[in-house]
Image (cartoon, rainbow, N blue to C red):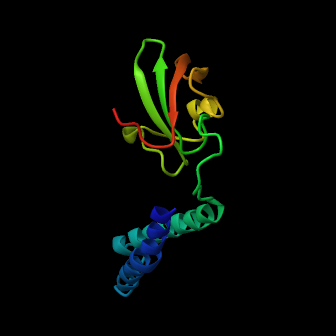
Amino acid sequence: MQRLRDELAYLWKVKRPEVTQAVSEAAAMGDRSENAEYIYGKKQLREIDRRIRFLQKRLDDLVVVDRLPEDQDKVFFGAWVRLEDQQGKILIYRIVGPDEFDIGKGWISVDSPLSRALMKKTAGDEVIVGLPEGKAEYTILEVSYQPFTD
């Protein structure tokens, strides 16, 4: 949430005024129909305004989860899950919000098919997930609300 707030503040207080000033200067140069700086600046302003509207709506809808679930043996939002796939490969994922996902860190969106299949499951449960290349089966090895230390 803070990252989105920071982006909104930057766009509104820094970037938009800079681009508005550049558009104003380009408009002062004369013929706007053939003025590339003016045309590009107006396009950039529309993109900034679109992102600002998106961020404002998104921030209104966000809910900060600031406490752990009562049953920490089950998979819920914020959980770290250690899985084993059918080939015996160990995978570790954390279930995060759709604005936070980063597959490089092992963070998957709560809206992803795998997250939805894992919800409310416990260690030892098996889940089947429909993927574009077919179904995948995983066994939950461990659930934690702190990062795993290997």
Residue at (42% x, 43% y) in the render: 102
The residue furthest top is 87
Residue at (52% x, 52% y) in the render: 99
Whether residue 118 is situated above or below residue 135 in the rendered picture: below
Q: Nearer the viewer, residue 90 or 123?
A: 123
Residue at (59% x, 44% y) in the render: 77
**Residue 16 left/right relative to 59:** left
Whether residue 86 is situated above or below residue 74 in the rendered picture: above
**Residue 112 left/right relative to 28:** right
Residue at (52% x, 62% y) in the render: 1
> x, y (%) of residue 137?
55, 17
- Count of picture labels: 0
> x, y (%) of residue 94?
48, 39
Task: Note whether residue 31 is visible.
Answer: no
Q: Nearer the viewer, residue 87 or 142?
A: 142
Whether residue 102 is situated above or below residue 47 in the rendered picture: above
Q: Nearer the viewer, residue 66 or 19?
A: 66
Task: Note whether residue 57 is visible.
Answer: yes
**Residue 58 left/right relative to 21:** right
> x, y (%) of residue 20?
42, 80
Q: Nearer the viewer, residue 72 or 100?
A: 72
Q: Quadrant of the C terminus?
A: top left
The residue furthest bottom is 28
